Image (tube, rainbow, N blue to C red):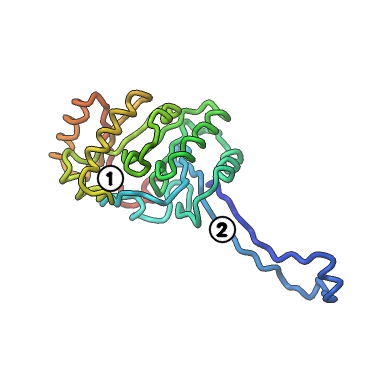
Amino acid sequence: MSSNIKTIRICILDNMMINQYNINIGDIPFLYTERIYMTIFYKLHDKLYVNITNACSCSCVFCIRKGGDGVGDADSLWLEREPSLDEIKEAFDKRDLDGVSEVVFCGYGEPLERADITVSVCEYIKSKCALPVRLNTNGLAELINPGFDISRLAVFDAVSISLNAADEDAYLKITRPKFGAGAYQAMLNFSLKVKKYTDVTFTAVDIIGQAQVEACVKIAESMGIPLRIRGFVGDNASYS
């Protein structure tokens, strides 16, 4: 089952109200409740994924969010609101880690939209277990959070950065970043900086075409960063 937070608002009648208004509890057929459902952790195969925001600075043509509301054991990864640090910690503490080989920050949003929270959650997870923790990111953290200290990402065992194009024109068409021109170079610069602190891997989705894939291979090699080509999956159910 996916981890979630349920906030329940209930109309409570105390003894004073019951006596003052001569209320017969048996006459009340039900108490109205309102639930806010948030899937913060979900499992896919042997990985536990962290979903703490739906915000993203890109709108990739192949984005998994276009294929359905959820993936893995999560019915929906759309959040009613962004969970607090305490709520995320509580959800993790309730999660069964049996059979989990890795924790991955990757949900229906860009984790570094909440950079401070993401780092804090990673630190908390590593204080609670020995599992490796990976961050999946679009690499635009310095545009999202100007002044963010990249060295803080050293807490992650690995960082996976979406390359997905071999030049800026293709990048703008494929990932459609809200920052426009300059975003591609910012992602490359970010990748080289993060490489100083932890293991970095580029990823690209095969839907970009063979010519772009081959060009991405050359760019990754020139930067000394491994590249992993992912197969495009249009149906989210196929992931599970």
Give the number of callouts. 2
* Type of amino acid under label 2: Ile
Instruction: Identify the residue at the far front of this view.
Output: 147
Quadrant hosting residue 36: bottom right
- Residue 90 at x, y = what percent? 60, 42
- Secondary structure, mark 2, is strand
| Mark 1 or mark 2, whichever is nearer to me | 2
Disc with the residue nearer the chain's start (1 vs 2): 2
Asked whether the viewer can see residue 63, the reply is: yes
Q: CA distance from mark 1 to mark 2?
A: 32 Å
Residue 35 versus residue 216 in the image, above or below? below
* Type of amino acid under label 1: Phe
- Residue 121 at x, y = what percent? 51, 37
Give me the residue at 13% from left, 39% from top: 211
Residue 138 versus residue 9 in the image, above or below? above
- Residue 68 at x, y = what percent? 38, 56
- Secondary structure, mark 1, is loop
Task: Report the residue marked by disc 2.
Answer: 36
Dot 1: within a 10 Å radius of its alpha carbon, few (fewer than 14), some, or many (20 or more) residues?
A: some
Give me the residue at 25% from left, 41% from top: 205
Which numbered marker is on residue 232?
1
Give me the residue at 33% from left, 39% from top: 142
User: Which of the two residues, 8 or 3, is positioned nearer the viewer here?
Assistant: 8
233 to the left or right of 39:
left
Quadrant hosting residue 217: top left
- Residue 19 at x, y = what percent? 86, 71
Dot 2: within a 10 Å radius of its alpha carbon, few (fewer than 14), some, or many (20 or more) residues?
A: few
Instruction: Identify the residue at the far left of this view.
Output: 211
